[in-house]
Image (tube, rainbow, N blue to C red):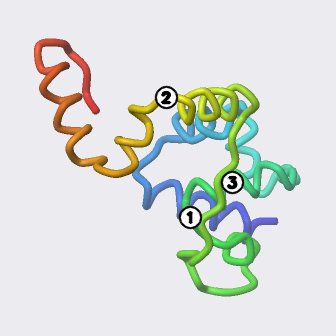
């Protein structure tokens, strides 16, 4: 388990994240993440999957089976709320336009929000 913890810590540091930040992303406690990184606790499969997806890597890398950091597979996991939101977005004509020209919409959002303290 120490190898797994070392890999997670390595990925976290490469991503310039604190334990607190990564724990929030993974929806776990900071103490749990610390235990995982130090090899003090077994890591649930769903947490391994979240880590692999977040860092776009293969679970086999985290497990120490191979040395391939980046995965060529793009897997997206979403909560029920996120799925519902995406389904509603698909019904809006603007969504289709965003897909066609995302850069134009990003510029539009930046222009519309320039007076607000919002970072995109």
- Secondary structure state at the residue bearing disc 2: loop
For marks 1 and 2, the one nearer the N-term is 1
Residues at discs 1 and 2 in contact (Cβ within 8 Å): no
Q: Quadrant of residue 25?
A: top right
- Secondary structure state at the residue bearing disc 1: loop
Distance, label 3 to label 1, CA atoms, is: 18 Å
For marks 3 and 2, the one nearer the N-term is 3
Q: Which residue is mark 2?
A: 92
For marks 3 and 1, the one nearer the N-term is 3
Label 2: few (<14), some or many (≥20) within 10 Å?
Answer: few
Q: Which residue is mark 3?
A: 37
| In the rendered image, the vertical position of residue 55 relative to residue 47, given as above or below | below
Q: Is residue 119 left or right of residue 51?
A: left
Distance, label 3 to label 2, CA atoms, is: 43 Å
Residue drawn at point x = 74 percent, y = 77 percent:
60
Q: Quadrant of residue 69?
A: bottom right
Q: Is residue 66 left or right of residue 71?
A: right
Q: Quadrant of the C terminus?
A: top left
Q: Which mark is residue 70?
A: none
Residues at discs 3 and 1 in contact (Cβ within 8 Å): no
Q: Which residue is mark 1?
A: 56
Q: Quadrant of residue 80?
A: top right
Which is more foreground, mark 3 or mark 2? 2
Q: Is residue 5 left or right of residue 100?
A: right
State the residue in front, 75 or 85: 85
Which is more foreground, mark 1 or mark 2? 2
Which is more foreground, mark 3 or mark 1? 1
Relative image position of residue 55 (x, y in whole percent): 55, 60
């Amino acid at each position: 388990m120490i190898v797994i913890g070392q890999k997670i810590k390595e990925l976290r540091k490469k991503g310039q994240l604190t334990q607190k930040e990564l724990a929030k992303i993974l929806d776990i406690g900071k103490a749990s993440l610390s235990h995982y990184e130090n090899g003090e606790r077994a890591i649930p499969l769903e947490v391994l999957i979240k880590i692999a997806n977040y860092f776009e890597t293969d679970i086999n890398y985290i497990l120490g089976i191979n040395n391939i950091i980046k995965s060529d597979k793009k897997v997206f996991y979403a909560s029920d709320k996120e799925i519902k939101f995406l389904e509603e977005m698909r019904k809006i004509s603007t969504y289709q336009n965003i897909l066609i020209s995302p850069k134009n919409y990003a510029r539009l959002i930046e222009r519309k929000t320039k007076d607000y303290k919002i970072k995109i």
